[in-house]
Amino acid sequence: MSDTQNLTLVQAVRDGLYTEMQRDESVMALGQDIGKNGGVFRATQGLQAEFGENRVVDTPLAESGIIGSAVGLAIDGMKPVAEIQFSGFIYPGFDQIVSHMARYRTRSRSRFTLPMVLRAPYGGGIRAPEHHSESKEAFYAHEAGLKVVVPSTPYDTKGLLTSAIRDPDPVVFLEPKLIYRAFRGEVPEESYEVPIGEAATRHEGEDVSVFTYGAMTRPTLEAAEDLAEEGIDAEIIDLRTVSPLDIDSIIESFEKTGRAVVVNEAPKSGGLAGEITAIIQERALLHQEAPVKRVTGFDVPVPLYAMEDYYLPNAARVADGIRETVEF
Amino acid sequence: MVVGDIATGTEVLVVGAGPGGYVAAIRAAQNGLDTTLVDKEAYGGSCLNHGCIPSKAFISATDVAHDARNAEEMGVHADPVVDVAAMQDWKEGVVNQLTGGVEKLCKANGVNLVQGEATFVDDSSVRIAHGGEGQGSESINFEHAIIATGSRPIQVPGFEFTADPVWSSRDALAIDDAPDSLVVVGAGYIGMELSTVFAKLGVDVTVVEMLDGVLPGYEDDVSRVVKKRAEALGIEFNFGEAASGWEETENGIVVATENEDGEESTYDAEKVLVAVGRQPVSESLDPENAGVELTENGFIETDDQTRTNVENIFAVGDVAGEPMLAHKASKEGIVAAEVIAGEPAALDQQAVPAAVFTDPEIATVGMTEAEAEEAGFEPKVGQFPFRANGRSLTTGESEGFVRIVAEAQAGFILGAQIVGPEASELIAELALAVEMGATLEDVASTIHTHPTLAEAVMEAAENADDQAIHTLNR
Amino acid sequence: MAIKEFKLPDVGEGVAEGELVSWAVSVGDAVSEGDIVAEVETDKALVEVPSRYDGKIAELHAEEGEIVPVGSVIISFDVDDGAAGGEDAPTAEADDTVEESADTDSDEAAAASTADGRVFAPPSARKLARELGVEIGAVEGTGPGGRVSDADVRAHADAEETEESGEEAAPDAATTEPVGGTADAETTSTTTAAASGAGADREKTLAVPATRRVAKELDVDIDAVPTAETREGEAFVTEQHVREFAEGGAEAGEPATAAAGSATGDQPREETVPYRGIRRTIGDQMAKSKFTAPHVTHHDTAEIDELVAAREELKATAEEKGSRLTYMAFVLKAVTAALKEYPVLNSELDEEEGVIRLKNYYNIGIAVATDAGLMVPVVKHVDQKGLLQLADEIQELATKARDRSITRTEMQDGTFTITNFGAFGGEYATPIINHPETAIMGLGAIKQRPVVQDGEVEAAHTLPLSLAIDHRVIDGAEAAQFTNAVKSYLAEPTKLLL
């Protein structure tokens, strides 16, 4: 029987890194302020003291360099976990991601794969200035050759990070920073995996399937609770992996309920909500009883403090969306 | 560089780590709740750091010196030298041991500790401003909050504590050496305890008090014993005088007072200690942001489950009202934590005991005879003087008495007042009696060890039925 | 039963033995604790020895005059299990309870809560009270001075519980059987039915969104559309299925109840309920019947004391044969007999042909209220069936109608209809004829009502009758005569044997 700890999500990131780095010498971390400082969110606290400067590397402020170095390290036998301090800053390194990180397997005909993880805090709701609240997982989902993972609980965080590190192919690991410290959950001390590409049913229901991930899982569950009192029984599916989507779970749920709502904080257009809608109508049209409702952010840059709460889906907006779908 | 505000979530946020707060936090954590404890200063609050513990440490130390100096009757001749700085160090050591203990206990129970000053943003979040290093401030979202911010000494206009010669009780306990002379404004329990300490340090103490006697709130025959002893220690009392101002002089200060006829008096001294009472620390929390209402005096009104007018916010300890006692705070802290955990807890104590650590000590619990009568009972009273108690005589401390107030019909004990040696310890038996609904018979027929001071309690109970052995009954 | 051995107790003063002077009991005697069982003499005194047990004397172990050592067994008792006396031997002298009465004046009257509402109870008792949801001030304390203990709190909580469960004892007073004795089978209202074939009733249906749109437009519940097609193993419906079903004008689901607006507080000014499906069909039929045939209703009351008695007599026999003999069976018989005498009420008007068809067969429809709406199953050839057979058939048809397994044929070819609104209560009504019949008989509630017999007002069982006729075909006089005939058969059911 292993012990469990009560950790926040960001503490689970740290614990996942620690556990895996202990287990496997080829695992290393690199990024800005992650070594001496322990990471601006304390995600790598104490790791450098434990594993040394060669395995926990403080990099210059150079996203392209960080990602590019990680690619190089990964080709040559290391399992690097690169951190970009905010997902909104990935763009200077975007070329490295799409031109190289996503392509090495295909370029080398599988002779080389990149067992690397690119982790970044993402998402809004934290009263930050520009660039710090992005939710652009769609960019990476659209690039073949990349897996994109978004955990929503401390338990899943450690488990998915472990799977990501062990995955022979590159994984973009987006951490919803709004809920970095919002609550604690039980996380086993031992090493364990949560499979990538597998969704989790957070609440079973009969009337409508609600697909969500990341920080939006909480307001969605809250909405479901409120709606239960109105007699609406919602099935909540936390996708956990955004690419590849767990299509089987999505369709299985949709065939049961015939109605769907997708909740994510990303901008509406060109986002994963549309992708899920397309998949549903492709595979389960005959079961469809209502249009798929997308409860998302808006097609504008994430606003600053005063308007931020209007941008992000909250329990009330999610509830409205579900109600609309059920009443169609 | 971190931008943005990532709020930490917690189930129970306790503001203030004094005897109300840290106890509440530990109990909440014991009940499996995710708990966060915030304090802007050291853990343990005023009690551990600036009040109960330091004052009792000084009292014990000065008692040792005083007793040794006055034990000739027993054949002990001594003239101890008191090193106040060393006393301070020792006291700080005790305090640190206790505050360290509180911290350890909290951590061991899984309580998250945060240093900083909390202010309410709304009824589910606070902003914590960090004093020292670290991020400037952070937000904490809570499901329930327990306000345990305690109290601070009342500042009399004209006697701002920021001035060097003006002391609050906190300053008086932070000394490294004793002044030559001291004016004490206020003859309540704090003023009396500290006057005694300083008198035993050889300081020239003058007490000015607005009311007519010392320790208002205690019966005359009880406070009289203490006053007599204080005077014997050399403390000078001036009643009916209100402190009106002070000025620096060549060799110190002069304190001016006014009586009700407007007549002025002046007293020279090195320092002036103002101990006129304590007021709740509440406004600085911005409670209105959470919707929490304050009374006129700044207290937070609570029900018998320690809940404020806001359903998920509780208040315990001094900030929640009288009596401003640490043990009452702890009890309320436990109730608050248990209520949040969903247990059917409530404040249902019959009485809260209180003690004054003067020389001799005073301790009371429950009703006085007059209060019993007012409440509609037919009181039955028993009393026993310490001078008739064997143990008391062997200690050389035999002033004072134990009085028990019961109701005549079934003999239920309603209250007790003790003045004399170890009163603060002896009262526990009677507090238990009051809570249990014990009768005089129950106490009287319980065998008490001989020779102890506690026998006085037994005999006081017997005396109520004219059955005391070692004193003439009535 | 257990055997307890009673040893000679220490009779005092350190005496080691005594002479058993006399027994106060014999073998077989029933003895209570404290009863004197023997006299024992020591050097100092004659002492009475009290029994320590409740029980029966099984054996005496000493003779009168014998010297008996202290501690030796002198009596064997037969005691009931659990009736063992206390361990403490009551001393030879006194049997008073040792406890000094701590309760001095026993009438301090629950001093447990005295002046000030003060309750004397230890903290543990107060906490227990809170946990059990008991108001501590209401608990009667049995401790000294009325002090409340844990046990007192528990006892109070238990007492409260039994009180509550006692209050719930009242059984459902719901009168399941209307006095009409016509039980469930015939609860109806005053209308006719419209039901034709039943639709489907699925939980899940596959259909393209376009089909669902059509279903919505036509007000059809897609789960009710019958289909034989499947896709992926589930029923699949096409637009054509939907349209066909809609045209069938069948019961496309129940009229929806009003939208779930918030129940409490703000009531919307109006609620809209769809007028479609069965409701609409019924409506159309009612309108057609009422506005084509000039209706006249003839009311009368049948005195049926004898019928009641007859049914009573036959009920037992019927049950033996597994039938429920209801009044409706008798009514069917009576009506059929009367129809034979007045065939014009068992007819159909064919305006096109210009003829009145008088039917020589007697298929009586019985209106049944079901969840899907009004239905009228038809009991065929009533004249050819016995009472019990009719009773069974009525039951069967009603059940089938209710669970929608009834067939079209079972609801066709009626020649006359009976509607028993009396099952709900009421005396007279003006029923609407079940087109294309020409008459309908409504039954009111069978009750005891005042009737005049021999100049005296008596209470008698009566059955109010409301006969509506199509005055194009039937005249008032015929209606009256028919009704009289029915009355006479109901009043004297033995006439039906003729």
Image (cartoon, coloured by chain):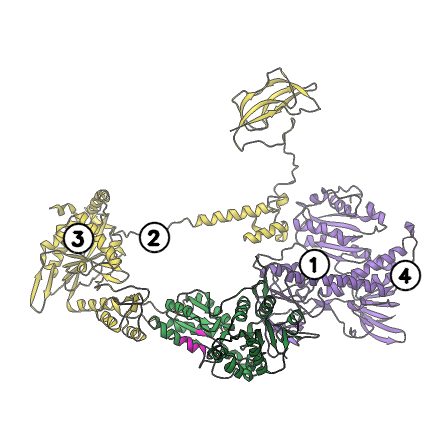
Among the chains pictured, the one given yellow colouring is C
- Asked if badges 1 and 2 are on one and the same chain, I answer no
Instruction: Quote the CA–CA distance across marks 3 and 2.
Output: 28 Å
Among the chains pictured, the one given purple colouring is B
For label 4, the residue is B81
Q: Amino acid at mark 3?
A: Leu
Q: Amino acid at mark 2?
A: Ala
Chain A: drawing colour: green
Report the magenta residues as a range. Answer: A262-277
Q: Amino acid at mark 1?
A: His
Q: Amino acid at mark 4?
A: Val
Residue that protrudes farthest toward the left in the picture: C354
Residue B103 position within the rendered picture, expressed as x and y whole percent measured from the top left? 69, 63
- Which numbered tag is attached to residue C332? 3
- Which numbered tag is attached to residue C174? 2
Mark 2 neighbour class, 10 Å CA radius: few under 14, some 14 to 19, many 20 or more: few
- Asked if badges 3 and 1 are on one and the same chain, I answer no
Residue C474 position within the rendered picture, expressed as x and y whole percent measured from the top left? 11, 62
